[in-house]
Amino acid sequence: MATQVTLELLKGYLERFGWHRYKAVDEPLEKEGIIHTGWRSSEEAEGYNMAIDPMVEKNCLSFRVSKVLVAPRETTPAERLADLLMAMGFINYRIILGKFAYDPRDGEVRFSVDVPIDENDLSYEQFQHCLGIAVKTVEEYAPKLKAIAAGEKTAQQFLDEELGGEAEAVAAFGQLLRELLERLEQELRQRREGQSDEPLEEV
């Protein structure tokens, strides 16, 4: 059952992962407490706060990175906010595990990985995978979302950057197909006109 996912288990997994700075606290009206921890990519980096919350009553374990950025509705230009939400929606569309979310009440943007813990144990490998996904995704996309919220980048520019490599690959593949089709049509035409006794070449 989900009750096997306890704070003691999660603390042991954190220690094994190499994160020794955390605080486990009780939560009122919940069977299990919550673990507060965080990381920073360098000494100069601002860093991020993460809560690891075994919500036993909901049979869910949540890895939440709070306040990735804050963009209140009252003070953020509507166009920037629309760009921010579009970029977040596209990121959520692309990634497999986890999601960015926006709270319209205070403008908080957070990232979370939520996994069910109904009737199975949580292995260290699963824990490591979820924690790693949270760190990697936030490190990759948080600076880009912050730039959009600050007006330094538009959603269109973000999409162009994200899709740039894919668009080039699709264009190159399309060009190759066009060249192959043109070659095939030319050889078929020559054969019909009796201008070539050569068999069709494989393409």
Image (cartoon, helix red, strand yellow):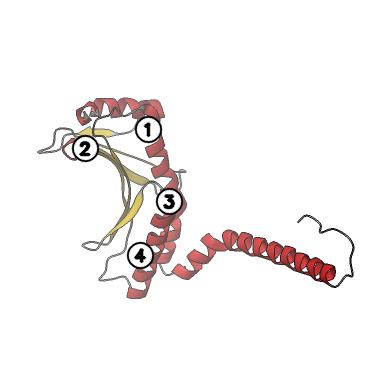
Of residues 168 and 48, the one nearer the viewer is 168
Direction from residue 139 to residue 3 in the image, left or right: left
Badge number at residue 95: 3
Amino acid type, callout 3: Ile
- Dot 2, crowdedness within 10 Å: few (<14), some or many (≥20)? some
Amino acid type, callout 2: Asn
Residue highlighted by disc 2: 59
User: Mark 4 vs mark 1: which is more N-terminal?
Assistant: 4
Q: Check disc 2 and report its element: helix, strand or loop.
A: loop
Badge number at residue 85: 4
- Please indicate, yes or no, whether residue 18 appears anywhere in the rendered image: no
Q: CA distance from mark 3 to mark 1?
A: 17 Å
Residue highlighted by disc 1: 126
In the rendered image, the quadrant that contains the N terminus is: top left
Instruction: Say above or below: 29 vs 175.
Output: above
- Please indicate, yes or no, whether residue 193 appears anywhere in the rendered image: yes
Q: CA distance from mark 4 to mark 1?
A: 30 Å
User: Mark 3 vs mark 2: which is more N-terminal?
Assistant: 2
User: Mark 4 vs mark 2: which is more N-terminal?
Assistant: 2
Q: Check disc 4 and report its element: helix, strand or loop.
A: helix
Q: CA distance from mark 1 to mark 2?
A: 16 Å
Instruction: Say above or below: 108 vs 82.
Output: above
Of residues 146 and 183, the one nearer the viewer is 183
Q: CA distance from mark 3 to mark 4?
A: 15 Å
In the rendered image, the quadrant that contains the C terminus is: bottom right
Residue 42 location (% of width, % of height): 47, 43
Image depth: mark 3 or mark 4 in front = 3
- Report if the CB atoms under discs 3 and 4 are less than 8 Å apart: no
